[in-house]
Every structure is written in C-alpha cells, then in structure tokens.
Amino acid sequence: MNPDKLWTKDFILLGLANLFMSIGFYFLMPTLPIYVVDKLQANKGEVGYVLAAYTLSALIIRPFTGYVIDRAGRKWIFIISFLLFAGTLGLYPLASTFMLLIFLRFFHGFLWGMTGTSGATLIVDVIPPARRGQGIGIYGLSMTIAMAVGPVLALIIMGKDHYNLMFFSSMFVALAGFMILIFVRYPPFESKNKDSFNIRNILETKTIPMALIQLLFGATYGGVVSFITLYAKEIGIQQASPFFFIFAAGIFISRLWSGKIFDRRGPQYLVIGGIFLLIIGFFILALVKNIGGYYSSAFFIGLGTGIMMPTLMAMANNVVDKTRRGAANATVITAFDLGIGLGSILLGFLSERITLGYTYLSCTLILAVAFLYFIWKGYSFYEKHLIKG
C-alpha cells in the first residue's frame, strides 16, 4: 500500500460521518437566532449570549479532551460524544424558555467540543504526513458542504414556525452520521505520553501563535454565523439562505487548492491572502447594503475562511510530536471557540448600539490585528519550531 495514499476507506468514512453531523449542527445556525427572537421574545444581544454559552462550554472541555485522548486514545471518546451530540439535538423542543435554552446550549457545547477535538485528532492520525495540509483541507470540506446544505434545508423545513420539525430533522441527520462510524477501522493507539495533569500539559504552548490568530479570526466568524440572518432583515433582504450557500462555495473553492499550496510552499502567503480576502468581504458586507453586496461578501468571506481554518490547523500539527496532537488541536480549536464566544457577545453588544453594518465594519480592525501579529511573530515562530516529516 502506498504510505502517502490519502483517499483510504477510513478517511472517506470519517469525512462522511463528519458531514452528516455537521449538517445537523448547521441546521441551527440560521434558525436558532430566529427561534430566540421570535419564539422566546429575546433581543439581538441575548442571541449572542445563547451562542456564547455553546462556545464557552466547548472551549472549557476541549483542553481536557485533548489531554485524555493523548493518553487513552481517540476512538471511544469520539464515538460516545458523537452519539450524545446527535441525541441532544432532539432536546431543543423542550427548551421553551430562555434560561432552559442557555442550559441546553451549554451542555450541547460540551459534546461538540469533545466530538470536534477527538475527530480532528483522529483524522490527522489517518492522513499521511506528506499530505497533511491537503488532507485536513479536504476533511474540512465536509463542514463546508454542511454549511451550504444545512441552513438551506433547515429554513425550508422550518418554514414560518415549524421549529420542532426542524430540530428533530437535525437529530436524525446527525444520527445517520453516527451509523457510518460502525464501518471505520480506527488506527491503533499506544500512548507514550506520561505527563501529569496540569494546565501546561492540557494546552500546547508551541501552538499559541496559531491559536491567537485563530481566536481573532473566530471573533469575526462568530459575527457571521450569529447575526447574518438578522442583518438580512435589517437591510431588507428577504432570503438569507443563499448567503450560506455562497459562503460555503467560497470555502469549497479555496480548499481545493490551498492545501496543496501549503504542502508545497508553506503557510506564509496563504495566511496573508486569507486575511485580506476576509477584510474585503467584511468591507463589502458592511458598506454595500443591497442584495449584490450581501451575497458577494459571502463569497469573499468564504474564500478567506476556507484558507484560514485548515492552514492554521495544519501549522499547529506540524510543530508538535504525534503524542501531543490532541493537546495541539484542542488548543487551536479552543481558541477558535473562544473567539466565536467573545465575538458573539461583543458584536451583539455593538449591534444594539451602532447597527449591524458598523459592527461588521469593526471586524476588519480585528482582522488587521491578526495580520500584523502573523507578520510580526506568528510565521517566524512556526518556521523555528517546524518538525520535518
């Protein structure tokens, strides 16, 4: 067997399982803000708190998940958390008050954090090192496709007020992904990591520069997923669902080639280009308040997102030994979750005071900070700690 073969049965099955789980996850992205505002009578600021509760619990659990999977293996944590995540989607009809929804989102975030961290580490174990950039990018396309399909299906199923039907549909889609896991042959795991449990060992310090950039990027991403459907209403656009489709198309296109560039030339120009594409997208979103600006911004933001997420993940895995991949992935994904949570709260706060348009304009400043940090510190740190092979 070719040791550099990427398209193995297990790689394909894990990608398909992640696709179905992610579709279930993205059912809630455009619909939950509407549910919170229309059904629970909350305001836009409270929408931010609902989404922040989810990301807060995910970022709390990820470092601990990384520590455990580096010692006990990835398989069973991934399988059990996947099943519980899918089942919890069916509990949303019971969340009939704002506080119940906050508690449910907090619990669901724990499961998302465990599933995402163990799955991201498991797929790196399956991908040949020489194809890591490309493999992570292709695996991430399952999230991208879900991002295009999930919101559209959810809005169609929900209609005007069929919230329960939408929630149960998301659960059944995610459970279909769980069934695929039965056919995966998981790679053998033997832990040689005997580090004691402490804060330095549950987080990977070598990935901090990548994590900081991921945090800043995550804050702007949180603004998109949290408020883009409400922004459509604010500027008079009736159909928000095409935004997610175009956004996903941008991610899909950039991931087709960005991973190959990473494996051949490294991350320097990818990160720089990704940040600039995001800045262009947010400028258009904030200033061109018509249907053309709304949809074209989705494409630019999608292109930038498709570059940034797999590139930063591959960078993190390239500076650590395989016994620290769990901690490395947990650190970077935790930073992304923290960014989404902080971004949801901050942008929700700003939107109540300066409108969503100016709020999205502020995202360009956040991205400018990420760009300056990468030029000043991030890339040189990566080059210094890069592990060959």
Image (cartoon, rainbow, N blue to C red):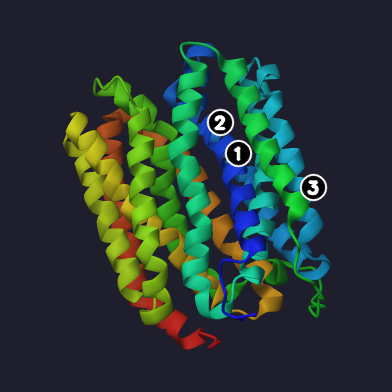
Look at label 3 and name its amino acid: Ile
Quadrant position of residue 167: top right
Position of the N terminus by quadrant: bottom right
Q: Is residue 315 above or below residue 92?
A: below
Q: Element under label 2?
A: helix
The image shows residue 303, relative to residue 149, as above or below, that is below
Q: In screen coordinates, is 280 left or right of 316?
A: left
Q: Is residue 77 above or below residue 158?
A: below
Residue at image position (56%, 66%) is 7
**Vertical comparison of 259 with 241: above or below:** below
Provide residue 54's location: percent of width, then percent of height.
60, 39
Residue drawn at point x = 25 percent, y = 34 percent: 357
Q: CA distance from mark 3 to mark 2?
A: 25 Å
Mark pair 2, 1: CA separation: 7 Å
Residue 346 in view of the camera: no
Q: Nearer the viewer, mark 3 or mark 2?
A: 3
SS state under label 1: helix
Looking at the image, is mark 3 or mark 1 earlier in the sequence?
A: 1
* Residue 231 position within the rendered picture, expressed as x and y whole percent measured from the top left: 32, 28
User: Mark 2: few, some, or many residues within 10 Å (few <14, many ≥20)?
Assistant: many
Q: Are marks 2 and 1 in contact (CB under 8 Å)?
A: yes
Residue 54's label in the rendered image is 1
Provide the residue designation for mark 3.
Answer: 80
Front residue (pair 197, 134): 134
Classify residue 238 by image quadrant.
Answer: top left
Q: Decide: few, some or many residues near mark 1? Use Cα within 10 Å; few <14, some 14-19, many ≥20.
A: many
State the residue position of label 2. 50
What amino acid does circle 1 point to? Tyr
